[in-house]
C-alpha cells in the first residue's frame, strides 16, 4: 500500500472535499508509487484562505524576533533530517542525491537567514522638514500569501518564499507542484513541529488549473509568489490583476556560458558540464547555450563531447550516477520534440539525442545528455527554454558579438563568462542583460543570501533571496509623529 497524504488546513490534516486523489511516481522507476495525494479544488482553497485570514490577525502581532526563533528551529529540524529529506526528494523527482542534499541545504540556509532577519527587518528614520516632528517608514505584514512552487527545487524554492513570508508576519496558503508533493508535506510537518501556530501555514495539493488559479483569483489572498514557466506566469499576472494583488514571478531562462579564447578551458569545461547537465538541465538557471570563441571552438568542443558521452545516467539514489531522469513523461517528450526541431532546423547532434536503452533505465523517463553544434542564434533550440539535458553550441568571433548573442533572448536570468582578462570580465558584467552574471563559474549555483531573479521575461522585477525578498513580503508604512503641540503644515508653514 502506498502512503496516503492529505491537505493541511487550520492545523488539521484533511482529504480533498471532492474525495479525489492523484498518484506521485518515481521518475527513475515508474512502478514505484511515492504517495497518493488529495486532488483538491476551489472549495479546499476557500477553506484554507479563511483559516489563513483568521490566523493572520494573531500572527502579525507576534514579535518578528519570536517568529525568527521558530524559523531557526525549522532550520535545526531540517539539519537533523537532511538525509531523509534528500532521499525522499530524489525518489519523487529524480535528481541525484548530491543535488537533493544541496536543495535541502539551500532551505536550511534560508531558514537561518530568515531567523536572524527577525532582529533586523530594518526600516528608515528620516529628518522632518518641520521642527518637533519625527518621521519614519516601517515594514508591516501584508496578509495572506499564496505560494505556488515548481518541482525542480522542491525544498529550496518553497523555503525561499514561505520563510520570508512568515518572518514578515504573513500567513500562507501553499500549493506545491503535483510532481513533488511529498517533500512539500515534509516541509509543512517541520514547520508545525517547530511551533508555527494553527492556520498560519496551510497546504493544498492539486493541479495548477484547479488549485493554483483558485489561489491567484481569490479576493482574500493579498499576494502571490510563483516560480514556473513564463506562459503560466503571464496567465497568473492576468488573473491576479482583477484583484490588483501583488505578484512575484520567477520564470524561464535561456542562459548562456560564453568562453573566450583567453579563458581557462579546463575550468570552463567543468563549468558547462555542471551548468548544462546538473539537475538533468531542469533548472531555470541551467546552461542551455554555450557560446565559444572561434579560436578555441574545435578544441573545446572535442574536450566537451568526450566528457558528455561518459556522463553516467541513472537512478539518482545510486552512488556515482551524475544525471537523473526527466521529471515525468511530458518533460521527456518535450526534450525529444526539441531534439527533432533542432535537427529539422539544420543543427547537428554531436552526442546524445535519444532516449537511452538498456542498463536498467527501462522504467524511467531518462534522456541522454545532448549537444547540438552548428546552431544559429535564430534557431528555436537557441531561443526557447527546453528544461532538459540539451546544450546548443554557437560560435563567436569576439567578446562584443558573444555578448550580443548571449543577450539575444526574451529571457535574462543567469549568465557566465570564462576569461582571464579583467577588462573582458568587467565589460561583460556591464553589458550582459541578466539578473545574475558569473565570472569563471557556471550559470547555476546561486547562494541563498543574495538577490535571485532575472530581467526581461524571466520575471516582473522582484527578487527572491537575501535582503531583497523582504521588499516583496512587507508593505511600507510611513509614520509622521508631530510633537510640537500645534498644527504644522508641510510645504506651507516652513516656506
Ligand atoms: C531554479 O532553477 O529554479 O542557482 C533555481 C541555482 C540554484 C537555484 C535554481 N541555487 O541554480
Image (cartoon, rainbow, N blue to C red):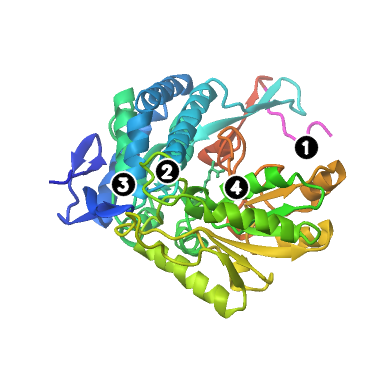
**Is residue 490 part of the magenta span, yes or no?**
yes
Marks 1 and 4, how far apart in space? 40 Å
Q: Which residue: 69% across, 49% down?
A: 416
Q: In this view, does 288 lie above or below 480?
A: below
Q: Name the residue under label 2.
A: 96
Say which of 385 and 224 sits in front. Answer: 385
- Label 2: state its secondary structure: loop
Q: Position of residue 226 (x, y in %)?
A: 47, 51
Q: Which of label 3 and label 1 is nearer to you?
A: 3
N-terminal-most mark, 3 or 1: 3
Ligand 1 near label 2 (Cβ, under 8 Å)? Answer: no
Q: Which of label 3 and label 2 is nearer to you?
A: 2
Q: Which residue: 46% across, 42% down?
A: 157
N-terminal-most mark, 3 or 2: 2
Ligand 1 near label 1 (Cβ, under 8 Å)? Answer: no
Q: Which of label 1 and label 2 is nearer to you?
A: 2
Say which of 309 and 341 sits in front. Answer: 309
Marks 4 and 2, how far apart in space? 25 Å
User: Which disc is residue 491 wearing?
Assistant: 1
Can residue 201 be seen here?
yes
Quarter that holds the C terminus: top right
Can residue 437 be seen here?
no
Q: Give the range drawn in magenta.
A: 486-495
Q: Mark 4 points at which residue?
A: 453
Predominant secondary structure in magenta?
Answer: loop
N-terminal-most mark, 1 or 2: 2
User: Mark 3 near mark 1, Cβ–Cβ under 8 Å?
Assistant: no
Say which of 299 and 200 sits in front. Answer: 299
Amino acid at each position: 500500500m502506498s502512503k496516503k497524504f492529505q491537505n493541511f488546513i487550520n492545523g488539521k490534516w484533511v482529504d480533498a472535499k471532492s474525495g479525489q486523489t492523484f498518484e506521485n511516481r518515481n521518475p527513475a522507476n515508474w512502478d514505484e508509487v511515492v504517495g497518493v495525494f488529495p486532488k483538491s479544488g476551489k472549495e479546499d482553497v476557500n477553506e484554507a484562505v479563511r483559516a489563513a485570514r483568521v490566523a493572520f490577525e494573531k500572527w502579525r502581532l507576534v514579535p518578528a524576533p519570536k517568529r525568527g526563533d521558530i524559523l531557526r528551529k525549522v532550520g535545526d529540524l531540517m539539519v537533523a533530517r537532511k538525509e531523509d529529506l534528500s532521499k525522499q526528494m530524489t525518489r519523487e523527482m529524480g535528481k541525484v542525491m548530491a543535488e537533493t542534499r544541496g536543495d535541502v541545504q539551500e532551505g536550511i540556509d534560508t531558514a537561518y537567514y530568515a531567523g536572524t532577519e527577525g532582529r533586523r527587518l530594518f526600516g528608515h528614520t528620516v529628518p522632518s522638514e518641520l521642527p518637533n516632528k519625527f518621521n519614519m517608514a516601517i515594514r508591516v505584514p501584508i496578509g495572506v500569501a499564496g505560494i505556488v512552487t515548481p518541482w525542480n527545487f522542491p525544498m529550496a524554492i518553497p523555503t525561499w518564499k514561505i520563510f520570508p513570508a512568515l518572518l514578515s508576519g504573513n500567513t500562507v496558503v501553499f500549493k506545491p507542484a503535483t510532481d513533488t508533493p511529498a517533500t512539500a508535506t515534509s516541509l509543512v510537518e517541520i514547520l508545525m513541529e517547530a511551533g508555527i501556530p494553527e492556520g498560519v501555514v496551510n497546504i493544498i495539493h492539486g493541479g495548477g488549473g484547479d488549485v493554483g488559479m483558485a489561489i491567484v483569483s481569490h479576493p482574500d489572498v493579498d499576494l502571490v509568489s510563483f516560480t514556473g514557466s513564463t506562459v503560466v506566469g503571464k496567465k497568473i499576472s492576468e488573473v491576479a490583476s482583477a484583484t490588483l494583488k501583488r505578484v512575484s514571478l520567477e520564470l524561464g531562462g535561456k542562459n548562456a556560458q560564453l568562453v573566450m579564447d583567453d579563458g581557462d578551458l579546463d575550468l570552463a569545461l567543468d563549468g558547462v558540464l555542471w551548468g548544462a547537465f546538473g539537475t538533468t538541465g531542469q533548472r531555470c538557471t541551467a546552461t542551455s547555450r554555450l557560446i565559444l570563441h572561434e579560436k578555441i571552438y574545435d578544441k573545446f568542443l572535442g574536450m566537451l563531447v568526450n566528457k558528455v558521452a561518459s556522463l553516467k545516467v541513472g537512478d539518482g539514489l545510486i552512488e556515482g550516477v551524475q544525471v537523473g531522469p526527466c521529471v515525468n513523461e511530458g518533460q521527456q517528450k518535450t526534450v525529444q520534440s526539441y531534439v527533432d526541431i533542432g535537427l529539422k532546423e539544420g543543427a547537428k547532434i554531436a552526442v546524445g539525442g535519444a532516449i537511452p536503452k538498456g542498463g536498467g533505465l527501462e522504467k524511467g523517463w531518462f534522456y541522454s545528455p545532448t549537444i547540438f553544434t552548428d546552431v544559429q542564434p535564430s534557431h528555436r533550440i537557441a531561443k526557447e527554454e527546453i528544461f532538459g539535458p540539451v546544450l546548443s553550441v554557437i560560435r563567436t568571433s569576439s567578446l562584443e558579438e558573444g555578448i550580443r548573442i548571449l543577450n539575444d533572448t526574451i529571457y535574462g536570468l543567469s549568465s557566465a563568462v570564462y576569461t582571464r582578462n579583467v577588462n573582458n570580465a568587467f565589460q561583460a558584467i556591464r553589458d550582459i542583460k541578466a539578473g545574475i552574471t558569473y565570472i569563471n563559474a557556471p550559470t547555476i549555483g546561486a547562494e541563498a543570501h543574495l538577490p535571485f531573479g532575472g530581467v526581461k521575461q524571466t520575471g516582473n522585477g522582484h527578487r527572491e533571496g537575501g535582503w531583497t525578498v523582504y521588499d516583496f513580503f512587507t508593505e511600507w508604512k510611513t509614520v509622521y509623529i508631530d510633537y510640537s503641540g500645534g498644527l504644522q503644515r508641510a510645504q506651507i508653514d516652513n516656506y
